[in-house]
Image (cartoon, rainbow, N blue to C red):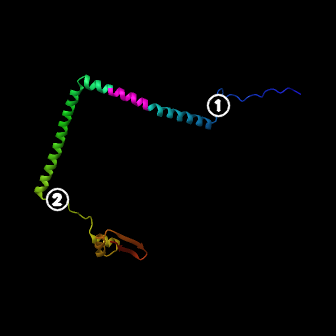
């Protein structure tokens, strides 16, 4: 009997990447992406602290050591002046409009209906008195049936 010899092993995927299935690419890529995301999540507090310390140093050097505080006050003074000018302009315009309408006697606080109650009642074929009564209630039930519109007034 012939002596058995070791079987030929499978070819290594690392040597022949065309043997990988799309599912294997997807799985390996997903694991890689997940672990990179986890690593960034773990390292982000350290990066945050380092960037915060650098920001404090830059803020201190720009504001205090290079006369930046005086520049900050100058900018705030100019911004405050602009804010006062804008607020004054708006208040002046509001007062002007108030005086214009006060002298003319025009007030636009009254309700101007688009159509009269009679027109609405005629369109929906209901009694105008019922429509006026329905406007006084907080709850109105409307049932559409074969015989027409039934209106039940609530409290």
- Is 154 rendered above or below residue 65? below
User: Closer to the N terminus: mark 2 or mark 1?
Assistant: 1
The label shown at residue 18 is: 1
Give coordinates of residue 81: x percent, y percent.
17, 36
Whether residue 53 appears in magenta in the rendering, the answer is yes
- Is 106 rendered above or below residue 83? below
Q: Quadrant of the N terminus?
A: top right
Q: Nearer the viewer, residue 51 or 125?
A: 51
Mark 2, other Cα within 10 Å: few <14 / some 14–19 / many ≥20:
few
* Residue under numbered circle 2: 107
- Is 76 rendered above or below residue 130? above
Mark 1, other Cα within 10 Å: few <14 / some 14–19 / many ≥20:
few
Question: Residue visible at 43% across and 29% down?
Answer: 46
Image quarter of residue 129: bottom left
The label shown at residue 48 is: none
Question: Residue visible at 19% across and 36% down?
Answer: 80
Give coordinates of residue 143: x percent, y percent.
40, 72
Q: Quadrant of the C terminus?
A: bottom left
The residue at the far top in this view is 65
- Per the rendered image, the range of residues in magenta is 45-56
CA separation in Å, label 2 and label 1: 82 Å
Image quarter of residue 140: bottom left
Q: Nearer the viewer, residue 133 or 73?
A: 73
């Amino acid at each position: 009997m012939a002596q058995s010899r070791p079987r030929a092993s499978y070819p290594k995927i690392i040597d022949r990447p065309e043997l990988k299935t799309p599912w294997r690419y997807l799985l390996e890529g997903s694991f890689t992406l997940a672990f990179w995301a986890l690593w960034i999540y773990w390292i982000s507090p350290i990066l945050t602290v380092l960037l915060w310390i650098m920001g404090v140093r830059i803020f201190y050097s720009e504001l205090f050591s290079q006369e930046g505080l005086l520049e900050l006050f100058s900018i705030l003074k100019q911004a405050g002046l602009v804010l006062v000018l804008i607020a004054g302009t708006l208040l002046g315009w509001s007062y002007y409009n108030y005086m214009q309408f006060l002298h003319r006697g025009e007030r636009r606080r009254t309700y101007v209906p688009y159509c009269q109650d009679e027109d609405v009642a005629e369109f929906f074929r209901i009694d105008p008195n019922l429509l006026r009564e329905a406007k006084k209630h907080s709850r109105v039930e409307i049932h559409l049936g074969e015989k027409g519109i039934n209106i039940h007034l609530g409290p």
